[in-house]
Amino acid sequence: MASLRDIKSRITSTQKTSHITKAMQMVAAAKLNRAEMNAKSFVPYMEKIQEVVASIALGSSDVTHPMLESRPVKKTGYLVITGDRGLCGAYNSSILRAVNTKIQERHKSKDEYAIIAIGRMGRDFFLKNDMNVVLEINGLPDQPNFSDIMEITNKTVAMFSDGTFDELYMYYNHFVSAMTQEVTAKKILPLNEIATSTKLMSYEYEPSPEAILEILLPQYAESLIYGALLDAKASEHAATMTAMKSATDNASDLIDELTLSYNRARQAMITQEITEIVGGAAALE
């Protein structure tokens, strides 16, 4: 049995750990509130730009654009959004497992795919497994602005336009609730599956629909990536909050068990001392 000093030391260290995890839980909860508001506030913009793009692209059969047309797939791009840190449960591992499984199923060599990694955890995983990472960005703030990812979104869309890859899929964790995040795979490019839940509007375009699409389609693709990043950030903070709450609860349970063990050991020691005293007194009689 461990000594009283050892048990007391474990209780103290576990209490210190629980204070840290509790603080991290509270910080993650505060970040989650703001991240959730950011993600929700971006939805109206996404819906409007989707409505305009759909109205132009689907409103006339004469309108064409390279980003709307499917082409033979020689190479597939995967944009993967993970976090820069751990301590967030299965947030990162679930995405990486899904992407790795899909790549192993669909491709036989590194020449058949390209990975754009947003987040250090994903970048490190793919490089460790010798997978083809062509773009990466790390160290994004907890509440990212569009300017923070403008460069990588511009390069991603440009790589599709110049034929570096022929289709692009995005993997990220979709925020459902503070307790639930779902791994989501979404096809970003080509934009040949644009759909809108609202009735298509009739617009007058100047100078022409083609000229409008030339500017609007890259912005739409970039906004899809940014919207997914906001969604993923909310999921990351929620996963961190849940993981830290679980760690705090486990620490509390462990402290209770250790305290019970400490009291039992202390009681046994006192009982033994009393027995020795009584035995010694009886021997003197």
Image (cartoon, helix red, strand yellow):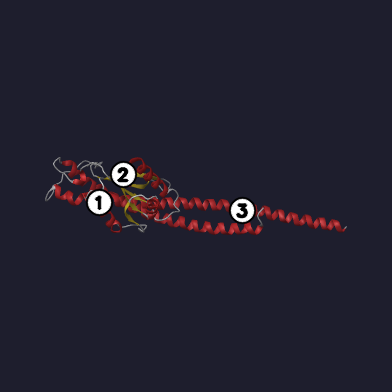
Q: Amino acid at mark 2?
A: Lys
Reading the image, the residue beneath label 3 is 258
Q: Which percent across, then down, holds residue 152? A: 28, 55
Q: In the image, which is nearer the foreground, mark 2 or mark 1?
A: 1
Helix, strand or loop for disc 3: helix
Mark 1 — residue?
159
Q: Foreground mark, 1 or 3?
A: 1
Q: In the rendered view, does 129 fall on the left or right side of 217? A: right
Element at badge 1? helix
Q: Please tell me whether mark 2 sits on a helix, a strand or a loop.
A: strand
Amino acid, disc 1: Met
The numbered mark at residue 186 is 2
Considering only order in the chain, which callout, 2 or 3, is on the residue closer to the N terminus?
2
The disc placed on residue 219 is none
Q: Is residue 75 above or below residue 139?
A: above
- State whether residue 39 appears in this view: no
Q: Measure the alpha-carbon separation of dots 3 and 2.
A: 48 Å
Residue at 55% across, 53% down: 252
